[in-house]
Amino acid sequence: MMNTAPSPQTPANQSQPRSVSEVSQLIQGLLKNDPKLANITMIGEVSGHSQPASGHSYFSVRDREAGLRCVMFRYGRGHQFLEDGALVLCQGSAGVYAPRGDLQIVVTSVEPVGVGDQQAQLEELKRKLRAEGLFDPSRKRPISQFPQRIAVITSEQGAVWHDIQNIVRRRYPLMELLLVPSAVQGELAPETIVEAFAELHHYAETDYVDAVIVGRGGGSAEDLMPYNDEMVARTIFASRIPVISAVGHETDFTIADDVADLRAPTPSAAAELVSPDIGGLSLETADFIQRLMRGLSGRVTLARQRLDLTQDRLSENAPETQRFRDRVEELRSRARISWTRYAAMKREAMKRVEAELRALGPDNILERGYVMVRGTDGSVITRAANVQPKTSLELTFADGTAETKVQSVTPK
């Protein structure tokens, strides 16, 4: 007789194992069979609303203590009333989204009720800050057209910092970027943003900073709430350094946008605003020089024509008076000499300006023996104090790049 191993016995107090999908279907059935959950009417504030090309609406309905995920398919009634901050009355049923196991309310209709608590508080804060003058356009400061150093307050790990670096390197590599890390969402984000401003102003006591970009990428209304914080708004208002707000996407608006000296629709747009196009500047300079030389040539030609006309008139009216003709010739000679000297002086001045602009180009600077030093994060390093021993650096020469490791640091 063949021996067989005994099969494992299920304890009396334990049910038979089920698959995840079976458990999901079991919960879904319980929800549908409960009359209280199969027909739900609830009131709350809309948050995180989005409506992709499918026409379905995805959002949350919240009160002060809780929030529930919701979906309303495109055939639902009242999509037009769904916007962040709106207080709405929803009808639907509870269900489970099986792929993620999320509890959600499948909403069939939405009716407007008013403004939610969070939105009402936000509007009240806006009225308060506007009355105090924090939004006054007359106090907004201009941003330097040719900045030397721009600070960025954002997450060190986020895509915003890397996007800004790439844009500035391409457009205006002469400008230095300074990262001041902060959280960009969550309850602690407002405090870290304020601390970042304090750190930046301490740095600016010894090193000049032209402006600071405060930003993050897109997100839900909750994600952007740190930039609606009163403490952050007052910190931006009190900043001694001009502030550029670059929060979320082009359609996102926060209190930080209203208080800042300049609003950029996106962080990438902020990088474009603060970095002049060095290639375009060279072309504009060359065009200006050409127009100036054409203008000088035209003025000299006009002066000569006027002198010729004066000589002709004197010759016709007083042909016997030689001294008039001599005087005209002397004036013509003086004018010719003066204009020649003036044109030569302007040409030399333009050549000096052009030479200085060319010398400012990064390639020419590197050709003179200078080296651009960057850290592993790609930021330009200008001080020995910012270098740590045993760290790797990238050296950019006129003809290529090299990687080196720091052995020691000796401050001046």
Image (cartoon, grey):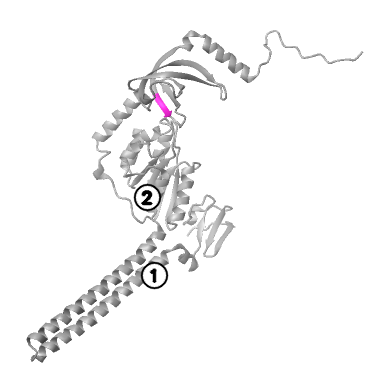
Amino acid carrying mark 2 in the image: Leu
Whether residue 395 can be seen here: yes
Magenta: main secondary structure equals strand
Asked if residue 50 is positioned above or below residue 135 in the image, the reply reads above
Q: Nearer the viewer, residue 293 or 215?
A: 293
Per the image, the residue denoted by label 1 is 355
Whether residue 205 can be seen here: no
Q: Give the answer, above or below, for where 101 lies relative to 343.
A: above
Q: Residue 200's x, y, as percent?
A: 40, 46
- What x and y, as percent, mark residue 295? 26, 70
Where residue 215 sits in the image (x, y, percent)? Answer: 41, 41
Answer with the quarter of the image where residue 188 lies.
Answer: top left
Residue 79, image x and y in percent? Answer: 39, 24
Name the side, left or right, on which 395 lies relative to 183. Answer: right
Name the element at disc 1. helix
Q: Residue at x 29, y 73 (%)?
A: 346
The amino acid sitting under disc 1 is Ala
Q: Which mark is residue 273?
A: 2
